[in-house]
Image (cartoon, grey):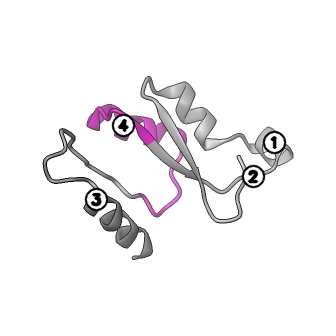
Amino acid sequence: ALLEKEMEVARRRIPPDAPVTVRSSIFSAPLEADGIAAAAARIQPDIVVLGTHGSGYLARFLIGSVAYNVAKATPFPLLLVPLHGATI
């Protein structure tokens, strides 16, 4: 519910006459990079925005990074947003 509220706050900041269309998909269950890339291919976004929990280098090396794999699997620009206390 908090994420949906934040999305609504962000949408209200866009002026009504702005030449942009905002569409969003919020996935609350863990998705693998292939699932995110497939969703992006269907939607054809101008940009993909992903939250990151900021795993350390060792965890990223051992299990990989979803964001890194999304970047490899899709041609769309990727914006990483660190969640509270996360590092990129």
Q: Kindly identify which residue carries mark 1.
A: 62
Q: Position of residue 5 (x, y in %)?
A: 36, 72
Q: Position of residue 22 (x, y in %)?
A: 25, 48
Mark 3 or mark 2: which comes first in sequence? Answer: 3
Q: Amino acid at mark 2?
A: Ser
Q: Amino acid at mark 4?
A: Ala
Task: Tell which tag, 3 or 2, sits nearer the viewer.
Answer: 3
Give me the residue at 44% from left, 23% from top: 75
Q: Kindly identify which residue carries mark 3.
A: 11
Give me the residue at 50% from left, 51% from top: 31
87 in the magenta segment: no
Q: Amino acid at mark 3?
A: Arg
Task: Tell which tag, 4 or 1, sits nearer the viewer.
Answer: 4
Instruction: Answer left or right for 77 relative to 58.
Output: left
Q: Kindly identify which residue carries mark 4.
A: 40
Quadrant that contains the N terminus: bottom left
Question: Residue 55 or 10: which is nearer the viewer?
Answer: 10
Q: Position of residue 25 (x, y in %)?
A: 33, 53
Q: Residue furthest bottom?
A: 1
Instruction: Answer left or right for 1 relative to 85.
Output: left
How crowded pointer 2 is (Cα within 10 Å; few <14, some 14-19, many 20+) is rated as: some
Question: Residue 87 or 9: which is nearer the viewer?
Answer: 9
- The span from disc 3 to disc 1 (Cα, nearest Å) is 37 Å
Instruction: Answer left or right for 6 relative to 16.
Output: right
| Residue 9, quarter of picture | bottom left
Q: Kindly identify which residue carries mark 2.
A: 55
For the image, the number of numbered tags is 4
Task: For mark 2, give the secondary structure.
Answer: loop
- The span from disc 4 to disc 1 (Cα, nearest Å) is 26 Å
Task: Tell which tag, 3 or 4, sits nearer the viewer.
Answer: 3
- The span from disc 4 to disc 2 (Cα, nearest Å) is 23 Å
